Image: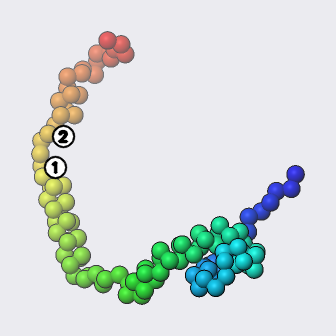
């Protein structure tokens, strides 16, 4: 059986068709026949262009510049905090001594039971 392959249209082509539809000189059916695209697709491209037209001009302004000194200060403070936490954990007798105490509870000569 022959499989129909979907046609991928470029952004330039979509914009051209959508602008033609926005002008309103021809109907969507006429535009679809002229460009070889289904009228429903023409309507979708027109709607998408109308919805995203405002964001086209916002993109030129670009993202707001980030102050590099502020981000580095924040990172250095976090590094300091993490170092303090690590030092505290190394000094605390909780984690290391618990393992040693548990090892002493079980004698090396005693066989370990696999069931309760």
Horizontally, is 115 left or right of 15 in the view? left
- Earlier in the chain: of badge 1 and badge 2, it is 1
Q: Nearer the viewer, residue 45 or 12?
A: 45
Local packing at callout 2 (Cα closer than 10 Å; few below 14, some 14-19, many 20+) is few
Q: Is residue 10 visible?
A: no
Image position, residue 15 (x, y; %): 60, 81
Distance between mark 1 and mark 2 Cα atoms: 8 Å
The circle drawn on residue 95 is 2
Horizontally, is 22 left or right of 38 in the view? left
Residue visible at 65% across and 67% down? Answer: 40
Horizontally, is 93 left or right of 18 in the view? left
Q: Is residue 67 visible?
A: yes
The circle drawn on residue 89 is 1
The circle drawn on residue 27 is none
Horizontally, is 12 left or right of 53 in the view? right
Image position, residue 5 (x, y; %): 77, 62
Residue visible at 39% across and 83% down? Answer: 58
Q: Secondary structure at mark 2?
A: helix
Q: Secondary structure at mark 1?
A: helix
C-beta proximity under 8 Å, tags 1 and 2: yes
Residue visible at 22% across and 82% down? Answer: 69
Q: Nearer the viewer, residue 60 or 97?
A: 60
Image position, residue 23 (x, y; %): 59, 85
Residue visible at 57% across and 75% down? Answer: 46
């Amino acid at each position: 059986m022959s499989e129909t392959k979907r046609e991928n249209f470029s952004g330039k082509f979509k914009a051209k068709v959508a602008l033609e539809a926005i002008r309103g000189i021809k109907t969507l059916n006429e535009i679809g026949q002229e460009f070889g695209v289904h009228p429903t697709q023409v309507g979708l491209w027109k709607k998408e262009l109308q919805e995203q037209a405002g964001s086209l001009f916002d993109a030129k302004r670009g993202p707001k510049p980030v102050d590099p000194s502020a981000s580095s200060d924040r990172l250095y403070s976090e590094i300091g905090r993490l170092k303090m936490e690590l030092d505290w954990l190394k000094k605390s007798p909780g984690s290391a001594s618990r393992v040693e105490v548990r090892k002493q509870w079980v004698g090396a000569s005693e066989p370990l039971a696999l069931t309760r």
